[in-house]
Image (tube, rainbow, N blue to C red):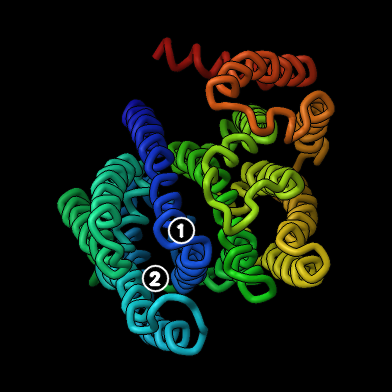
């Protein structure tokens, strides 16, 4: 247990460092793209990025299915069985890599030569190819080791290598942008450094897990739910990426650029939350499958604190983000980047998406992918249908309205299934936390709407942010403590137990 606690601590620290570096660097390149190439090129590059995110669906099903299958095996140190699972995963990845290569070539040709953009067709073709090279290496060589490292609680190794990758690649890209306007050279710099990082993870895993035998008899039954998992992952990809694709088709690339700039801020925060949570989800997954009584006791406290912190983060973003976007896009006049309604919709969308992660984790830990895949199908149908109609009437904001409609449905069914079918408790346990934090959010919004500090200088914004954040955070803590003392008591007992060990 002490070893597991140590890995949680290393994972958490490395996640925080990685996210600080990522957030610091992620805002530089889009600004330079806007200044050097304009909103349309920024929109084109953002669309390509989203297309490749969709391409990750080829491995999404088997990746999560393998993760779920390994929790119990790694927790019980059943390495022979774990080798059989990863042998099956490896066979699937090789087949997937071949399919991925064919699809990439088709997309590169179609996107470069069939869709009119201001970027030279040959240049766009090679940009697409260079985007694909690291993923191809991952499919054929490294991906199965990454899954094993995450399940084993060694995410900190991945985080540290990703931190170095971001520092080196962003420094290289910025240097290229300052010296030349070559989009191919910019992408080539990232491609080379990414391959070095993936190679490091491969050799690390080979040395760490000498017991792993990829020639063992494949246990395809262990990952038999990969198709059901794929449906869930497809739903997640629709949520995360359909907006950009639909906006590029139904609006224009300048609208994509506006969406992408707002999404930079929210995606970095979401990545931060996900990265921190992933520092200990391996322990929760193993605990669910090996010590259910202890898991049930801790889950209520985890859910309470997670949702409270999520609401705090997005409430502060709702109040203080708009002036930051105005500062960030100052001097860029080829598109209108100030949109209060768009910001509010982004906040609501991310509250719903991130707030449901604890109960969504229950489905992953229990392996209930097949039983809940219809939920994911309906979420996709609602998302795409409502988004298309709403974009026609409301433009860029309509894309998020469609996603919010789908998320409301998915939250309801996921809360019901996780509580009733798996945890065998009342759904009120989860809804109570949502109601408490939702009430505080509405109260803060009644005091400060999203444009309360609009057009304020950075120093004044920083001062107001510090002052008002104190009482907003305090209000959330008081409200949650008043209505859910047991969660605070559980965390206190857990911390005392750790201290006395």
For the residue labelled by badge 1, is the local secondary structure a helix, a strand or a loop?
A: helix
The quarter of the picture where the N terminus appears is: top left
Kindly indicate the quadrant of the structure image that contains residue 183: bottom left
390 with respect to 7 (left or right)? right
* Residue 232 visible in the current orientation: no
Label 1 with label 2: CB-CB less than 8 Å: yes
Viewed as shown, does residue 101 lie left or right of 243? left
Please tell me whether residue 33 is drawn above or below residue 122 in the rendered image: above
- Looking at the figure, which quarter contains the C terminus? top left
The residue depicted at 72 percent of the width and 50 percent of the height is: 342
Camera-side residue of 46 and 199:
46
Label 2 sits on a secondary structure element that is loop
Picture layout, residue 344 above or below residue 78: above
Q: Earlier in the sequence, mark 1 or mark 2?
A: 1
Distance Cα–Cα, label 1 vs label 2: 10 Å
Q: Could you tell me which residue is drawn at 16 percent across and 56 percent down? A: 203
Residue 414: percent from left, percent from top: 73, 52
Res. 470 visible in picture? yes
| Residue 491 image-quadrant placement | top right
Describe residue 233's horizontal placement relative to residue 246 as left or right.
left
Q: Residue at x 40, y 45 (%)?
A: 28
Q: Nearer the viewer, residue 172 or 162?
A: 172
Q: Residues within 10 Å of mark 1 (few under 14, many from 20)?
A: many
> Which residue was labeled with disc 2?
219
Position of residue 198 measured from the top left corner of the image (x, y, whole percent):
24, 58
- Residue indicated by mark 1: 69
**Where is residue 256 drawn, in percent x and y?**
59, 63
User: Is residue 303 shown left or right of residue 28?
Assistant: right
Residue sitting at 82 percent across and 31 percent down? 442
In x, y percent, where is residue 280?
A: 46, 37
């Amino acid at each position: 247990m002490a070893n597991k606690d140590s890995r949680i601590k290393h994972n958490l620290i490395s996640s925080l460092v990685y996210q600080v570096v990522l957030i610091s660097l992620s805002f530089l390149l889009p600004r330079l793209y806007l200044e050097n190439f304009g909103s349309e090129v920024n929109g084109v590059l953002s669309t390509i990025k989203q297309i490749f995110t969709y391409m990750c669906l080829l491995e999404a099903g088997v990746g999560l299915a393998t993760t779920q299958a390994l929790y119990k095996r790694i927790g019980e140190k059943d390495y022979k069985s774990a080798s059989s699972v990863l042998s099956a995963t490896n066979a699937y990845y090789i087949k997937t890599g071949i399919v991925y290569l064919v699809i990439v070539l088709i997309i590169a040709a179609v996107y470069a030569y069939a869709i009119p953009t201001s970027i030279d067709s040959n240049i766009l073709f090679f940009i697409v190819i260079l985007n694909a090279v690291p993923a191809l290496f991952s499919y054929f060589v490294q991906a199965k080791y990454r899954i094993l490292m995450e399940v084993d609680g060694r995410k900190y190794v991945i985080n540290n290598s990703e931190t170095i990758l971001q520092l080196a690649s962003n420094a290289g890209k910025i240097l290229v942008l300052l010296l030349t306007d070559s989009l191919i050279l910019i992408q080539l710099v990232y491609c080379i450094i990414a391959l070095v990082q993936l190679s490091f993870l491969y050799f690390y895993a080979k040395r760490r897990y000498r017991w792993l035998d990829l020639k063992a008899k494949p246990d395809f039954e262990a990952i038999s739910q990969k198709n059901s998992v794929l449906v869930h992952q497809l739903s997640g990809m629709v949520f995360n990426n359909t907006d950009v694709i639909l906006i590029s088709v139904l609006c224009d690339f300048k609208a994509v650029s506006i969406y992408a700039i707002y999404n930079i801020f929210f995606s970095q925060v979401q990545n931060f939350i996900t990265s921190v949570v992933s520092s200990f989800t391996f322990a929760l997954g193993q605990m669910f499958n090996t010590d259910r009584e202890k898991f049930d006791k801790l889950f209520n406290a985890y859910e309470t604190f997670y949702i409270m912190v999520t609401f705090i983060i997005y409430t502060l973003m709702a109040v203080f983000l708009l002036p930051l976007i105005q500062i960030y896009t100052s001097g860029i006049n080829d598109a209108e980047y100030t949109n209060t309604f768009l910001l509010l919709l982004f906040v609501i969308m991310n509250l719903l998406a991130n707030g449901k992660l604890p109960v969504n984790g229950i489905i992953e830990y229990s392996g209930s992918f097949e039983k809940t895949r219809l939920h994911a199908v309906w979420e996709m149908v609602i998302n795409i249908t409502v988004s298309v109609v709403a974009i026609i009437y409301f433009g860029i904001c309509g894309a998020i309205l469609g996603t919010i409609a789908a998320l409301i449905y998915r939250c309801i069914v996921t809360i019901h299934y996780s509580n009733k079918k798996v945890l065998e408790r009342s759904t009120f346990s989860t809804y109570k936390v949502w109601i408490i934090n939702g009430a505080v959010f509405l109260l803060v919004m009644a005091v400060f709407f999203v444009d309360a500090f609009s057009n304020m200088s950075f120093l004044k914004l920083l001062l107001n942010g510090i002052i008002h954040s104190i009482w907003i955070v305090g209000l959330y803590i008081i409200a949650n403590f008043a209505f859910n003392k047991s969660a605070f008591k559980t965390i206190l007992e857990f911390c005392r137990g750790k201290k006395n060990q």
